Image (tube, rainbow, N blue to C red):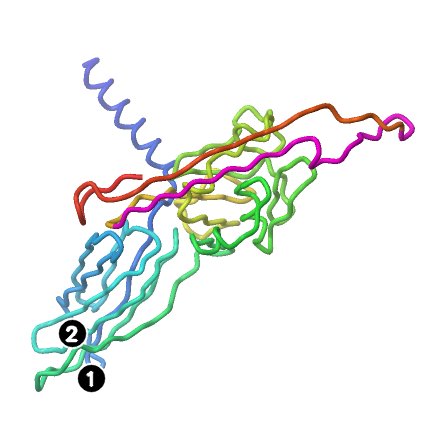
Amino acid sequence: MKKVICFFVFILMCIGFSVQAQVTTSVLSGKVIDDLNENVIGATVVAVHEPSGTMYGAVTNTDGRYTIQGMRTGGPYKVEISYVGYKKAVFTDIRLELGNTYTLNATLYPSSEQLGEVVVTADAKANIGASENFSTGKIQGTPTVDRNIYDIVKNMPMAMTSKNGGISFAGSNNRYNSFQIDGTVSNDVFGLAASGTNGGQTNANPISMDAIQEIQVVVAPFDVRQSGFTGGGINAITKQGNNAYHASVYSYFTNESLYGKYNAYKDNIKDKLTEQSTKTFGGTLSGPIIKDKLFFF
């Protein structure tokens, strides 16, 4: 009897942990119809993440709709929709955003003769409320002095930085925010750092900017999977590697000369700054272990 009780307690704990899980992937969905505006039942949808060769698939239901969940963010993706007796519809340069659903509808036409491949490009997504996504390109193109993730996040219209190094959303206190890395909460749970992140007291960044693939910021999201905060939710996912080898290195430093010669205090009496310096070095390396199947970063 005790073993049975322990087993059920374990199951309940697992369910509790799963509720706290956050979004780390993207979703592709849509509807497939024919030239007579009828639902196409059983059409095959295949999406390929071209940089890594990762393949996802789905089949349309009785309403002609399909949904593919758990997809890698970013892209580009190549999507092929096919059905017996119809010409294949091909969509290229599809790019998915973290936590958002990309809507891709298609119309299939009867195949009366052998034709070449039809290539269609589209851009559509369904937002989950007040949110902002920062792709790898946006992250790399945003100037930052100390390579802090907040230098990226503050570009959201509803964000505002504070003097203590924190950031607030829609006027809420930064201690009500939630910061997640690959779905794992990485807040300053003891409330010691004004920034609200681990390492904030030593001005350390919670994660290297070179390791981040995409950042999503949500405020009052519609998605019930995004929970555990009343301010803003910062969701960062790390890079995963693909079929090509990539490497990067970086370094930066600061010293007293970059802050000025004197520190004014006590009736503006000038006190010369003491010697101080901070040096940071880092690098990344990624590539395939097994092509199209297994990667490292």
Residue placed most toward the observer, 4 or 104: 104
Q: Which residues are magenta?
A: 244-268
Q: Is residue 77 magenta?
A: no
Q: Which amino acid is tagged 1?
A: Leu
The residue tagged with tag 2: helix, strand or loop?
loop
Q: Which mark is residue 36?
A: 1
Tell me residue 218's x, y (percent): 49, 49
Taking the magenta stretch, the answer to whether it contains residue 257 is yes
Relative horizontal placement of residue 108, taking residue 71 as reference (left or right): left
The quarter holding residue 232 reads top right
Image disc number at residue 88: 2
Instruction: Give the answer, above or below, for where 56 lies relative to 45.
Output: above
Residue drawn at (18%, 59%) of the image:
58
Position of the N terminus by quadrant: top left
Kindly identify the amino acid type of the residue bearing the numbered disc 2: Lys
The 10 Å Cα crowd at callout 1, few under 14, some 14 to 19, many 20 or more, is few
> x, y (%) of residue 3?
19, 15
What residue is rendered at 20% in x and 40% in y? 289
User: Of label 1 and label 2, which has the lower sequence position?
Assistant: 1
Residue most toward the top?
A: 2
Q: CA distance from mark 1 to mark 2?
A: 16 Å
The label number, if any, that marks residue 101 in the structure image = none
User: In the rendered image of this protein, does residue 96 appear above or below residue 275?
Assistant: below
